[in-house]
Image: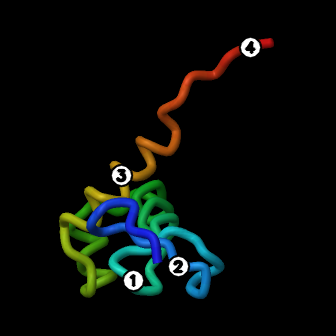
């Protein structure tokens, strides 16, 4: 199991190796999809009571770091 930070984990035997929250079967993409569907943090925490506010922040930070790279035009 690889820890990308203290809250985001990757395990090749869980959820197809996709990043999850604290080893649970809640994928980072699940949280991001709910944010993009218009839910706010309070609603997300109500929908997924196993999550903590810091988990939501970790998902956003993970996504931000994942896309933070230069794009070089050929």
How far apart marks 2 and 1 lie (CA) works out to 8 Å
Q: What's the colour scheme?
A: rainbow
Q: Position of residue 70 (x, y in %)?
A: 56, 22
Residue at 45% x, 66% y is: 28
Mark toward the start of the polypeptide (3 vs 1): 1
Residue 44 appears in which quarter of the rendering? bottom left
Q: Secondary structure at mark 2?
A: loop
Give the number of the mark in front: 3 or 1: 1
Mark 2 and mark 3 in contact? Answer it, CB < 8 Å: no
Residue beneath disc 4? 73
- Of label 4 and label 3, which has the lower sequence position? 3
Q: Are marks 2 and 1 in contact (CB under 8 Å)?
A: yes
User: Which residue in the protein does label 3 denote?
Assistant: 60
Q: Residues within 10 Å of mark 4 (few under 14, many from 20)?
A: few
The mark found on residue 23 in the picture is 1
Circle 3 Cα neighbour tier, 10 Å, few/some/many (<14 / 14–19 / ≥20): some
Label 2 vs 3, first from the N-terminus: 2
Residue 57 locus on image (x, y percent) = 26, 56
Q: Position of residue 22 (x, y in %)?
A: 33, 78
> Where the C terminus falls, by quadrant?
top right
- Residue sitting farthest toward the top: 74
Q: Nearer the viewer, mark 4 or mark 2?
A: 2
Q: Nearer the viewer, residue 32 or 13?
A: 13
The 10 Å Cα crowd at callout 2, few under 14, some 14 to 19, many 20 or more, is some
| Disc on the earlier residue, 2 or 1 | 2
Residue annotated with mark 2: 11
Q: Residue at x 27, y 71 (%)?
A: 43
Give the SS element for disc 4. loop
- Please, which residue is most extreme toward the right here? 74
């Amino acid at each position: 199991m690889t820890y990308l930070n203290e809250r985001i984990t990757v395990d090749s035997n869980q959820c197809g190796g996709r990043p999850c929250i604290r080893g649970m079967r809640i994928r980072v993409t699940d949280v991001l999809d709910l944010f993009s569907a218009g839910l706010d943090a309070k609603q997300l925490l109500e929908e997924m009571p196993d999550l903590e506010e810091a988990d939501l922040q970790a998902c956003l930070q993970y996504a931000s770091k994942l896309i933070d790279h230069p794009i070089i035009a050929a």
